[in-house]
Amino acid sequence: AQKITQTQPGMFVQEKEAVTLDCTYDTSDPSYGLFWYKQPSSGEMIFLIYQGSYDQQNATEGRYSLNFQKARKSANLVISASQLGDSAMYFCAMREGDDKIIFGKGTRLHILP
Amino acid sequence: DAGVIQSPRHEVTEMGQEVTLRCKPISGHDYLFWYRQTMMRGLELLIYFNNNVPIDDSGMPEDRFSAKMPNASFSTLKIQPSEPRDSAVYFCASRHYNEKLFFGSGTQLSVL
């Protein structure tokens, strides 16, 4: 069963607009963590942001914020003021307990000039 | 630290040949993960180790795939015999307990 769901295979957004990338997850473990990674065309995997299941505040890292809605099991990534360099593949991931980390299928984001 | 080091970066082989992918995790990290990335299936977890011990290999697609971690600084993923459908990018990643994953640069495998 799919535990991490990213429903948007691709998105096109105008430069300088805000972007929301969707991610829903499924776990019965009370302790878990949620990550977002960026993969540009060069292929490297770049860590963006992390949210723990017990964290009271939504995580923020510069232009990135994580809209964590625990009851809805969603962990959407928000990118403010998008830039051309944000064009990439974005992966949502979940750590269950202390161990395994699994990824969604990703969303390809295209920023238009 | 040099980060997670994978070799080779690219591997082209013929169907039926044995393929060995190598990974050196970041020193001090106690978890090591192998992932496979394809367009159709995204990033699939193949297997992960904790303190050199395989914990979950349920993602290993077939008996043709095997992985070892003989010590804290080295792991291999072997495919024998290889098939065209094994063509993908294989990532190794490591982390310390309760921290984020650090990825290697990946191995682009092409099986002809």
Image (tube, helix red, strand yellow):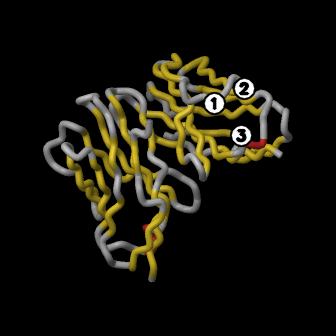
Give the image location of residue B104, x and y in percent: 56, 43
Kind of residue at badge 3: Asp
Amino acid type of the residue that numbered disc 2 sits on in the rendered structure: Arg
Q: What is the number of the mark on residue B64?
A: 2
- Compared with B51, B40 (above or below) is below
Q: Secondary structure at mark 1?
A: loop
Q: Secondary structure at mark 3?
A: helix
How busy is the neighbourhood of tag 1: few (under 14 within 10 Å), some, or many (20 plus)? few
State how far apart marks 1 and 3 are (Cα).
10 Å
Q: For mark 2, name the chain.
A: B
Tell me residue B55's x, y (percent).
48, 19
> Do the numbered discs 3 and 2 sit on residues whose CB atoms are within 8 Å?
yes
The residues tagged by marks 2 and 1 sit, at their Cα atoms, a distance apart of 8 Å
- As helix, strand or loop, the secondary structure at mark 2 comes to loop
Discs 1 and 3 share one subunit: yes
Provide the chain ID for the residue under circle 3.
Answer: B
Tell which circle, 1 or 3, labels the residue nearer the N-terminal end. 1
Q: Which residue is mark 3?
A: B86
A37 left or right of B85?
A: left
Residue B2 appears in the figure? no
